[in-house]
Image (cartoon, helix red, strand yellow):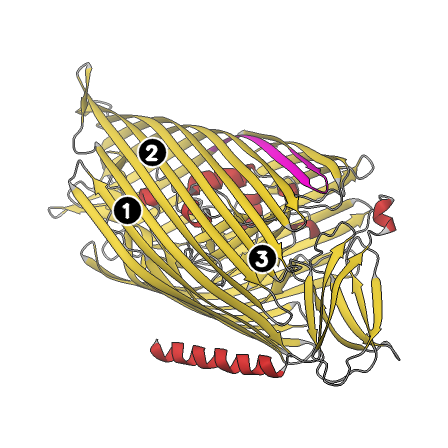
Amino acid sequence: MKGFFLLFQLLVFCVADQVSAQQNRSVSGMVTDSAGNAISAATVVVTREKDNGVLVSTVSGSDGSFMVNLSSAPGQFLIRISAVGHSPLTVGPYSLKDGQLSISLGRLTLRQSSDVLQAVAVTAKKPLVEYKMGMTVVNVEAGISAAGSTVLELLEKSPGVIVDKDGNINLNGKSGVQVLIDGKPTYLSNADLHAMLKSMQGDEVRSIELVSSPSAKYDAAGNGGVINIRTKRMKGYGANGMVTLGGGMGQYSKANAGWQLNYRTRALNIFGSYNLQHNESFKELDISRKAESNGTITDFRQANFEKNNNLNHSLRAGVDWSIGKNAVVGFLFNGTLNREDQCVNGTTQMGTSVIVDSLLASSTGSRSNLSNYTYNVNYKQQFDSGLHEINVDVDWGRFTSDEDVNYNNTFSFPDGSLWKPAQLLRSANNTGIEIRSARMDYTFHPKWMKLDAGFKVSNVLSDNTMIFEKKAGEEWQNDPLRTNSFNYDETVWAGYLNGSYNLRKWQYQWGIRVEKTNSEGISPTTNKTVNRSYVDYFPFLQLSYAINKEYRLGFSYSKRIQRPNYQSLNPFIYFLDQYGYRVGNPFLDPQRMHQFEMTLVVKGKYILQGAASFTEDMISEVLLPDTSAKAIYSTYANLNKQQIFRISASAPITVGKWLRSNINANAIYLETRSENLNGKDLNAGRFFLLVNNSNSFHLAKGLTAELNNKFTGKLVYSTVMIAPIYSMDIGLSKTILKDKGTLKFAIADVFNTIRQDVNSVYPGFDYRLVQKLETRVFRINFAYRFGNTNVKASRNRNTGMDTEQGRLKKDLQ
């Protein structure tokens, strides 16, 4: 590792020397609209005046700035600038005099296109999937995957994304993914995030960014990378809004409704949205296993049917106020209320493979209420026409969960007579998690580079109580073996430095992040205390070289960390029935990962990538046997090592104007090793395929159709082997009401093929688990846009609590 840092420092010094040699013959400026707002992704082209020959081109950054290097004296040249929704601009001619190092053009203003002013629709076709160095962008607007779909379903269709049976999101075979919306944290537990993504309408989404190798500017947490969901945005001033109404039917009904409002002036932007979702669904779970105790083998065949009734409210509101020419102060509120009623009925047959000698009938009813409120105050200041920028965020959030569960277990012989008295149990689980965070980011952006630096401090306080009772006669008595409490206090200090610059055909980005963590977990009822204190360093390096106009080669390296979810540390026993339970692990250590990627981009759209990642102390949920109780239980454990090797290829296909298709294929080898996992060694791994195919058909004016296929091959993950899964989705979209309304119809999982078929790879543990969710659903959705559709949406910004909120997890599924 010392050798790596020496090489890294040498590379930085060499790059700095090259930069010094190449500062001359550069042209820079900033692209803005008539109101002085920065225009990002504007195309800047430098041409010779005498013959309009193109010398070099680039695009403006998020702050509107651009810089191009001229390798030789070009004589007289022009600058041509264009951006969607604006009239093109040509300035010049210019020339570089002898000895002149650079030309700064200052602000270059583009006027709004007359087509836009006359409300004439201007559309530009984008590919369904775009690939950039370190990032894959799914352009949802380019297709109709959003046709009645939820954002969760859009994620499930995205290249390299797997959503497992518990709603956990994996990217390219890796867990621990941070999910952002418009660059801002989702502020939700895993379960609440799952519910929110199911309630968000796909019509709201512009694109999904899949970042496999985040830079040092991101928090180091999240082994799987970052998924950023960008919502649709518009331009101009005034007010606009959208209302949506939809319904669906699988085995049970679904309904959703929502609104978005946005009002913007030169100095003030007020925005808000509200979504309501009602969803009834089911889950079937069958488990077949063998349990050995005192030399006797017992067969268990368990069948459960779970009915869920979920009602979710989500509210987002905020304001941005320009208090000066280059200063903005803002406030943001996110709130979620979720109520879920759950009823589970199960039957367990026990005996030999041919004779059933006893039965367990279990009935469980629960109601959970979850709330999540977060507040953010932020400040942004630019100095020297964008040369310097400061962003400050202060956040506070509160998550609460209250769940009451009643258990009824009846033990009988096949003839119906009881062999054991009925068991009546109940539990009350209360969780409160408070998160406080503050951070400051500084950006220095001269003509030839960009430098980011910042620091952050966050504190998490978690208070959990589990009260478990059993009924004896007519009275409820406390069960001391299951009643427990757990308190957790964690503070993380972090600082980072990140730099990037372009040198002719080279693009460089490097960074280093340092994080210090102090934590304490206390269980008063079990008299257990776990203290942690550690410092970690997270280097990041990304290089890109343009071989020629059609080929670009890139390399990246990053180190990441994944800390345990707060509630997975709880030493609580979550009771399912007499022979199944879940328990937390307060002794979990964080996992650390090193990742390497090599990428070849051809013609800006064909991608070939090779990647490898190595994880130590991998945190994983494992299914293990409890031989003394003949039970099966799940817990969280640190597995010694995980390594992943991946080769992926992606290609867009266009047939005339009527078909746009994209194919993404991944061949992945995933291996997990662990010594002395519950007394036995684990060594499991295999290759598997992950293939996505999206097809969009233009049938007529305003009428489009979509067909999506996804295949996940047989894979081994942690202690389980999961059988192959294939699914197909179709959709149809029609614009109505003078293009202000959109009517969409979709069928998810047309052939009802999605199910989780799981077998154990843990030595000596024989079971099969089959889980079927309600995946085939028919949906119809209507959206209507009103007001000035050219209003610019609220500005994107990160707040300071994304990592901490992402680690909230509800363990009661």
Vertical placement of 545 versus 594: above or below?
below
Q: Which residue is mark 2?
A: 431
Q: Which residue is mark 1?
A: 635
Disc 1 versus disc 2: nearer the observer: 2
Q: Marks 3 and 1: in contact by CB < 8 Å?
A: no
Seen at 37% across and 54% down, the residue is 493
Q: Sort mark 2 into few (<14), some (14-19) or many (20+) by Cα contacts within 10 Å.
A: many
**Quadrant housing the N terminus:** bottom left
Disc 3 versus disc 2: nearer the observer: 3
Q: Nearer the viewer, residue 420 or 796?
A: 796
Vertical placement of 358 versus 752: above or below?
above
Q: Amino acid at mark 3?
A: Glu
Q: Marks 2 and 1: in contact by CB < 8 Å?
A: no
Seen at 70% across and 55% down, the residue is 38
Mark yes or no: residue 585 visible. no
- Disc 2 is placed on an element classified as strand
Using residue 149 as the reference point, say whether residue 555 is left or right of it. left
